[in-house]
Amino acid sequence: ATALSGVMAAEGPRSLFALSAAAVSRSMGALERDVWALPGHLLRGLLPLLTVFRLERAEDAARRAGLSTQPIWRKLWDDVMKTRPPNSENITCWRKKFLETFFSNVLHGVLDVSSDWRLNDHHFSPLLHSSPHVSQLTLCNMLQGAVELTAAHNQKVLENLAGSLRILKFQHLLSSDQSIRRSLVLLLHRLIHHGSVSQVSMYSWPVPDTVLLVLILSMSAGFWRSGNALMYHGSPCGLCREEDKAQSQESAQERAERGHCDEREWSDGENQKGFPRAPEAADAEVNGYRANTCLNSVLSRPRSPLQNQACEEASSKVPCDHTSLQGGSSHCISDQLSCHPVLRKTRRRLKSAVGKKRRCLRRSRGPYADPEDLYDFVFTVAREDNSGLLNKNSTTEGENGENWTSSSLGSPCTGHAGCKKRGSAGIFSLKAAHRFRSVSTLELFSIPLTGETCRTLSNLLSSWVSLENLVLSYNGLGANILCILSGLRALSRHSDCHLRVVRVSDVFSHMPCMELVRCILSAFPQLHTLSVSFDLKNQLEGNRPEGNPSCSEAEIPESCLEQLEIRFPREPLHTMFLLPVLKASKSLQQLSLDSATLPCSQELGLLLEALKECNPNLKKLSFHDMNLAEHQKEVLLLLQDPVLQEITFSFCRLFESSTTEFLSEIINTVKRNSSLKSLKLPGNRLGNHRLVALADIFSEDSSSSLCQLDVSSNCIKPDGLLEFTKKLEGHIQQRGGQIQFTHLRLFQNWLDQDAKTAQEALRRLKAVCSVVNDSWDSSQAFADYISVM
């Protein structure tokens, strides 16, 4: 109240209404219900005088009165945050934006609630009252935020986040001790396994802590130990306990039903065969609901990656045929179990769970009973290579199953050093893990992944059926990309797999881009979006020819691909290697080619012919950083394509060696094309005179439907922009104001050279269309200016 009075005194004399409103705001605790019933014109003057606590509670009353609180929340942002948020023009709800950022700043200790009277309300618990509005949260450094959120006094805050949070980010993480990791386990278990988090992203971790990284990856994939490992302030996880109780009841009913069914089948089988069953066979059927039923149940239910691997390895080595299983004999299975310890252990471990659903909570037994062993799940990473914990006779899926290419790439995880190790990180530990809810999006940016971590990630991916989006950016994968692809190949065999988007980018490429694209599509034809991007060739690996038979001879099944993006590390674009991808992608709608070189003058023409023949539904085509100066004919053919709706020539040097006639041909071609909606020409050195000429696209005799034009980074000065604006206004007037042009992009042009002229041009342009520009120092581009002159 004192702070509010001081603010009012500083603003000078106030009206009687203002004084009354201030008095009411100070007594909201007693008057709140009456205030919400006030008429709209009175409520409008009162809302700016409320604290954040009362303002948030006033939303319903304001809505009923036809009032918007958005201007008040925006002013709160300006006064408290004192920064301009990125993409502020796209913010639709300033209330959510303020409270979400407020939550994060308070959690990380960068905002003092006593700094503003509107935040300082004794009824207001900063984290508790803002948490329902948080859909995205970033944890950084030493994970202090995780420790705070899992503290006993913030239990309700954590419950709110479990319902509201969708995106969880980790940035600039540092190594942490066991107590902090314990808090992280509780946080991830509540927000992912029992919450609504659907995306986990990790950024900028130059030297990742392997234990911490594997922990986050594993829990994001839905794996974790149960029992004592999930104690929350001395008590087991209540949600796990509730699920366990419900599942136990359902399991009891299923066991009763199956037991009755099996008893009847057993009786029928004996009557038909007419001879007594062997004791061991009878035991197998009584305890395992018939051996073949048991194995089918085990093989069909969702399993951990190790269980998948164990079953596939054993089944590939079993010499007896499946007809004996169909006939009901259990001797074959007993022999298999006795000869193959991995399968025998798997069956014994799962035997007691037949007829049950996977339980979220189960008491730990054996070596995992001690709560001090909470982090054995990830601590074994460094020592499993030589521990011999896995059966020495077991082999990897890649060694056992069919190669995902029929040639020199070989098994997915044996193509490089270290991939053939038996004890890869985290695999053994997953045997003791239970499966919980998992996220649908995983993003790793600028986090180096070692061979061990890649094998762990591959193992997790192999059964991560809920995953829809995978982004691996600048992780230094190198040859480890083959290990990741091995996991994707295993994942693609799951009928309930949801993965549709894969984006891989890095500095060095282990193999030619087209080879990698074909390998990924061969392994995972269900993808809708595939992006492969590399900066440089890996000189250490040598420059293998683009036509390497490892993938060039592999057949690509018909794919669901709709969007393909390839950034070549200055590799030549050979249409013959891209052609099989295009043929297999009949649904392709967007194609982006970046930084490729054209080995011959006919190559672009061959590509256009292939696109016309194979991809009739292509709507968007983009070329970036490719020299098209000598391909004017192909450029004009693209601009007159009757199907394409968006064409991008970005930094393609279109006018480097062109004549005035080429620009006129471009304009006339676009004028005649009624299907083209967007034309993007950034970085092509248009200059003033070419920009002014482009205004003729919208002349009275034009049938163009162009809505968007991008002329960013084109050495445009204010006087040229003003002349373009005047010419455009003239064409609009001639057409009676009827024009479809709606968006103009002007980033990184020389509009700072004459601020007054630029402001006039922009003001007049904004009356015609939406203009997006920035404040850019044109002195950085002096060399380009000289070249245009």
Image (cartoon, grey):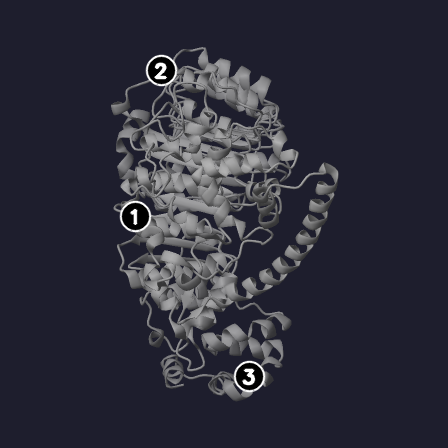
Q: Is residue 73 above or below residue 210?
A: below
Q: Quadrant of the C terminus?
A: top left
Q: Which mark is residue 358?
A: none
Tell me: 105 left or right of 306.
Answer: left
Closer mark to the observer between disc 1 and disc 2: 1
Whether residues under marks 1 and 3 lie with C-beta atoms below 8 angstroms apart, the answer is no
Report the residue marked by disc 1: 210
Residue 6 x, y percent position in the rendering: 36, 83
Report the residue marked by disc 3: 32
Report the residue marked by disc 2: 545
Q: Between residue 23 and residue 324, name the one nearer to us.
A: 324
Visible residue check, residue 516? yes
Mark 1: few, some, or many residues within 10 Å (few <14, many ≥20)? some
Mark 2: few, some, or many residues within 10 Å (few <14, many ≥20)? few
Q: Between residue 615 and residue 339, name the one nearer to us.
A: 339
Q: Is residue 296 above or below residue 63?
A: above
Residue 506 x, y percent position in the rendering: 34, 34
Quarter occupied by residue 79:
bottom left
